[in-house]
Amino acid sequence: MERRNKFEIIIDILELMQRKGGNIKPTHLLYGGNLSYDRLKKYIQELEEKGLIMQVTDKGKIRYRITDKGINFVNEARKIKEITDAFGL
Amino acid sequence: MIIRLMAVNWLNALGTLVSFFGAFIALFIGIYAYKAFKATEKREYKLLALSFFLIAFQALIYATVLPLLYIFYNKMYFSLSNLEIIFMAYKPILLQVSHVINFLFILTTLMGYTLLAYLYSKIQSKSLLILLGSLVFALSVYSFSYVSFIGFNLTSILLLGYVSYHTIKNYNEKKNRNALYIAASFSLILISHLLFVASEIYSSDQTRALFSLLGPISQLAGYLSLFIVLIRAQYGKKK
């Protein structure tokens, strides 16, 4: 299996959030994203800083939600990936 | 595909339209490749963007500057006969300008194709890229002579042949429609260069006209194929 680059990991995290209805527990992100805790923490921090996700509290539990900016980013990334994949580089 | 100032007809108008369309498509693909580079910082996407920007630039030269020069040249020649002295004074300058623009057209086209071929070679060597660039530059210098037309097209055929081979290989591995459209587009643009060469080789006027017509049509089909990939990506069509 090929190693994912940073871009692909970010897309995987955001797509996972979208699949789970835009709202996800950190543990689900950990398993679904196939990342170590430290790496996931780093990515979550970066995604929050960029405004692609936000932390919400639901019944006292921390969850992460994809923002509108995050949804737009995933859609744009899908287009980019589809075009670049077609070239096979 | 070079406009010669004195030998133009409606076929060149068709070529101009096709090039406008091609410039538009190449620009969009260049922008997407650049976005991919910004997101991933992968060098190959930077080079892909650069190659499509060069292709867009050459198509824009063909679609705008060369026809403008042609119109200017012919208007002066046919309509302003009373100003023949002025025209005669400007004629050498005009011809020189057209040569320089032809040179730029050939250089940017071949640089764009060379970058694509280099990308598909998967050889990560700057010195190879410099060597290829120098060869293309040297070849482009020949654009100042008439023989450049066939030389330019034959070089394009070689480079696009290499690119087409890899895009077809990519389609055979992935079996997805976008890869098929990319393979088809490069193959059709390659065929258009073959037709442009054929239009030069055949002496019969009818055969030449036929090849001159089929060349831009094949090129248009190639650009349309790239356009389909853009549309499919835009509206999320899969497989």
Image (tube, coloured by chain):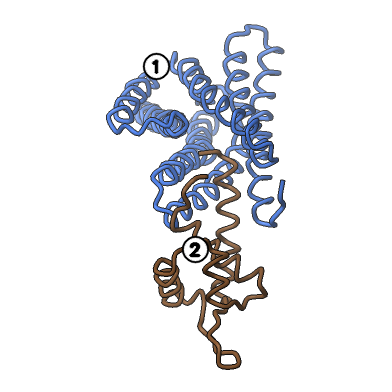
Chain colours: A brown, B blue
How many numbered discs sit on the rendered protein? 2
Q: Quadrant of residue A39?
A: bottom left
Q: Quadrant of residue B107?
A: top left
- Of residues B120 and B217, which is closer to you in this image? B120
- In the picture shown, does residue B10 fall above or below B223? above
Amino acid under label 1? Ser
Distance from label 2 to label 1 (Cα)?
A: 53 Å
Most extreme residue toward the bottom, as rendered?
A60
Q: Quadrant of residue B210?
A: top right
Taking the spot 63% from the left edge, 33% from the top edge, the residue there is B173
Amino acid under label 2? Ile
Q: Is residue A45 left or right of B222 when viewed as pictured?
A: left
**Residue B13: x percent and y percent?**
63, 34
- Of residues B233 and B19, which is closer to you in this image? B233
- In the picture shown, does residue A49 fall above or below B76? below
- Of residues B47 and B28, which is closer to you in this image? B47
**Residue on which the image places disc 2:** A10
Label annotation for residue B145: 1
Taking the spot 67% from the left edge, 18% from the top edge, the residue there is B211
User: In the image, are marks 2 and 1 on the same chain?
Assistant: no
